Amino acid sequence: MNKMWRNIHFAFVWILAIGTVSTSRIALGYDIIEVPKHYPTIQDAVDHVKAGGWILVRPGTYNEIVRVRTLNVLIYGHPGEHPVVEGGFVVESDGVKIHEIDIKVTEEAVVGIALTGTDYLPQEEIELTNNIIYPSDTGAVRGIGLAVCIRCKISGNYIDGFELEGLAVHGNSKGTVIRGNTVVHNLMYGINLSPTSQFAQVIDNITEFNKTCDIIDSGLSNKIKRNDAAKLCR
């Protein structure tokens, strides 16, 4: 019950914030793009948005694998509208936020939202919130995959039914916050923290019916607490 009310409160605050802040941004001349009103595809919008810009995705099905290379971009749908990306996202820049998008992951995409950071060029402060991520067919192996990410936040997502794992934190990622997600019915792991991940916080998640482990923590100084997880592996 508390978790449900937290989600309702978050959605209400988000609606108020989008309405108020969007008006202010328009008045100040900031970049706000609406899909498909201004551009027919999300990729077109991403290719034209300025750093710090917002992309509002209206209801519809968008068959594309979207590569995000612009800094600090917000890609979002309004609560309840459920725009569907049949494909996935590849995030290649810092500060990107993806919110309230349904992602039907194809075999071509492999991963619903894939981050591409490396030890030499880590990504920072990515936020993935309130998305619904599920496979469209065989060959989709992972819902969310972080390569090397610093202070990234993953919260409120629903991830269901992948061939390998729902959510993976790989490489020397540090300070990842994984909170309030539902990760279920994956054929190996629900949430997978790699041996080199550090100082992650995995809190208040529902991880059930994942075949091998609901949460596997092989990392360093990670904090795992208050999760609904029947199978916790270390």
Image (cartoon, rainbow, N blue to C red):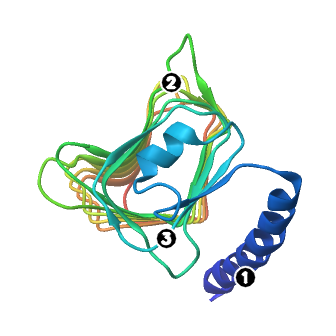
Task: Decide which of tag 2 and tag 3 comes sooner along the chain.
Answer: 3
Q: Residue at x 77, y 74 (%)?
A: 19
Q: Nearer the viewer, mark 2 or mark 3?
A: 3
The residue type indicated by label 2 comes to: Gly
- Residue drawn 37% across the image and 72% down it: 60
Quarter residue 14 falls in: bottom right
Q: Which one is nearer the viewer's eye here, 45 or 125?
A: 45
Of residues 229 and 156, the one nearer the viewer is 156
Q: Residues within 10 Å of mark 2 (few under 14, many from 20)?
A: many
Inter-mark Cα distance, 1 to 3: 18 Å
Quadrant of the snapshot with the N terminus: bottom right
- The part of the image, by quadrant, that contains residue 13 is bottom right
Q: What's the distance in space between the residues labelled 2 and 3, CA to CA?
A: 29 Å
Q: Are marks 2 and 3 in contact (CB under 8 Å)?
A: no
Q: Which mark is residue 58?
A: 3
Quick one: label 1 or label 2, which is nearer the N terminus? 1
Q: Label 2: which residue? A: 117
